Image (cartoon, rainbow, N blue to C red):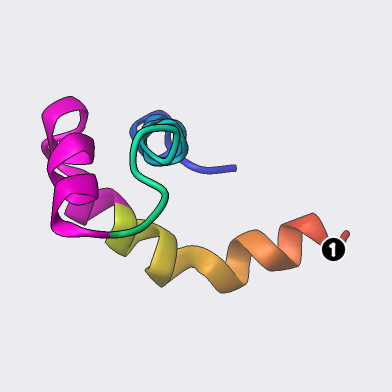
Amino acid sequence: MAPKPVIDYIVIHELAHLKEMNHSKKFWGLVAQHCPRWREHKKWLKDNECGLLTRLSI
């Protein structure tokens, strides 16, 4: 339901939690190493969360 780069960001975000169990500067640095456009993808999720939740509830 999301663009592939956004899904990739979600996977990278969750995998980064295997090394850093928080949202510290170190965590975001790790995410950025593997997903330089993470801010853009995070914004897409925020901007589209209502639509995604609506689709999930159908």
Residue drawn 59% across the image and 73% down it: 50
Return the x and y of residue 38 as percentages of the image width and height.
22, 46
The image quarter in which residue 30 lies: top left
Return the x and y of residue 5 as percentages of the image width and height.
34, 32
The image quarter in which residue 18 lies: top left
Q: How dense is the environment of label 1, judged by Cα within 10 Å: few (below 14), some, or many (20 and up)? A: few
Q: Nearer the viewer, residue 13 or 45?
A: 13
Residue drawn 84% across the image and 63% down it: 57
Q: Which quarter shows the N terminus?
A: top right
Magenta stretch contains residue 26:
yes
Q: Is residue 31 above or below residue 40?
A: above
Q: Which residue is mark 1?
A: 57
Residue drawn 46% across the image and 32% down it: 11
Residue 35 in the figure: left or right of residue 49: left
Magenta stretch contains residue 43:
no
Return the x and y of residue 16 as percentages of the image width and height.
36, 35
Residue 18 in the figure: left or right of residue 16: right
From which residue to which does the magenta span run?
Answer: 24-41
The residue sitting at the right extreme is: 58
Tag 1 secondary structure: loop
Q: Nearer the viewer, residue 35 or 53?
A: 35
Main SS of residues in magenta: helix
Q: Which quarter shows the C terminus?
A: bottom right
Q: Is residue 46 above or below residue 9?
A: below
Amino acid type, residue under disc 1 in the picture: Ser
Return the x and y of residue 41 as percentages of the image width and height.
29, 49
Residue drawn 20% across the image and 26% down it: 34
